[in-house]
Amino acid sequence: MVALRRLGAMVLTLVISSFVIFAGMYAAPGDPVSFLIGNPENMTPERIAAVRAEYHLDDPFITQYLTWAKDLLHGDFGTSMVYQQSVTTLLGSRLPVTLSLVVYASVLFIVIGVLLGIWSALRRGTAVDALITGVTTFATSIPNFVVAVVLISVFAVKLRWFAVSGPGEGFFGRIHHLTLPAIALCLGAIAVVSRVTRQTMVEQQSLDHVEAARSYGLAQRKTVARHVLRNSLGPIVTMCGLIVAGMLAGTVVVEGVFGLNGIGSLLVEAINTHDFPVVQAILLYMVIAYMAVTVIVDLIYPLLDARVLARSAA
């Protein structure tokens, strides 16, 4: 029953999102016919009528939406007005770069953020804790584009350790080229995860079962691993999932600064050129990506907390 409710909520969210996305493009200023035809010399009555008939522009709004939605169900996102190729093919060529960047950034912020949070919690009240807290607080206030510009100036231009732009070729080439973009994308996330990890572990350390484990003589390392960190994983995983979902839809700035041909840069190009089918497809991708990540987090959470699994079974 719970699974059916979740599935129904996802379908409803997807339908509402698709309707809002299509309505937003429908209400956008300008006549789509002028963008489809392009050259003003070709704006003849016959050509205008043919384009309107081909793209169903004379149909009522609801009819246009239902036609578009039906095509989506068959995997047809339409044709790009600018590139004159299938939107599905266009997204397929750009998606690997964005996914590689997000995966790289996610590994960095999860590993570094959690380790810093654990270190800070275990050294609570010391200079190390104050230093980590201060640095992470400062990191959250720096915009991505500022971090990107500084990284390029220092590590790409002056030191020449990394490439200035491009995704690179091959596995190691891509890792090398995406290091600076991944750092720029995840720096703020490292700070957030570190603070959440620290706060959650500090709260867990003061609970009765942790004090009982210490009183029985359980080693500090085992106490932290079995009773503190393990019970802190729920909020940490939830926060990491939300950040990853946000990254999937928030690579626009970083891709633009580093010259990466990903989904984010494609969205900017499509908006500037009024390429409505591409904009609609990318916005829908962002909704689906966010939903997919949140569903994965929901599936993982009960595995981390047996109490949640018991309540779900009941």
Image: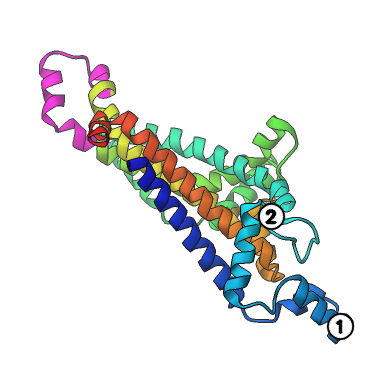
Which percent across, then down, holds residue 117? 34, 36
Residue sitting nearer the eye, 235 or 33: 33
Residue sitting nearer the eye, 303 or 111: 303
- What segment carries the magenta color? 201-224
Q: Residue at x 38, y 34 (%)?
A: 300
Q: Residues within 10 Å of mark 2 (few under 14, many from 20)?
A: some
Residue that numbered label 1 is attached to: 46
Q: Quadrant of residue 45?
A: bottom right
Membership of 203 in magenta stretch: yes
Quick check: can you spot residue 125? no
Q: Residue at x 45, y 32 (%)?
A: 111
Quadrant where the image shows the C terminus: top left
Which percent across, then down, holds residue 164? 70, 47
Q: CA distance from mark 1 to mark 2?
A: 27 Å
What colouring style does the render use? rainbow
Q: Residue at x 62, y 40 (%)?
A: 100
Secondary structure under the numbered disc 2 in the rendered image: loop
Residue that numbered label 2 is attached to: 76
Judged from this view, the residue extending furthest toward the right is 41
Quick check: can you spot residue 169? yes
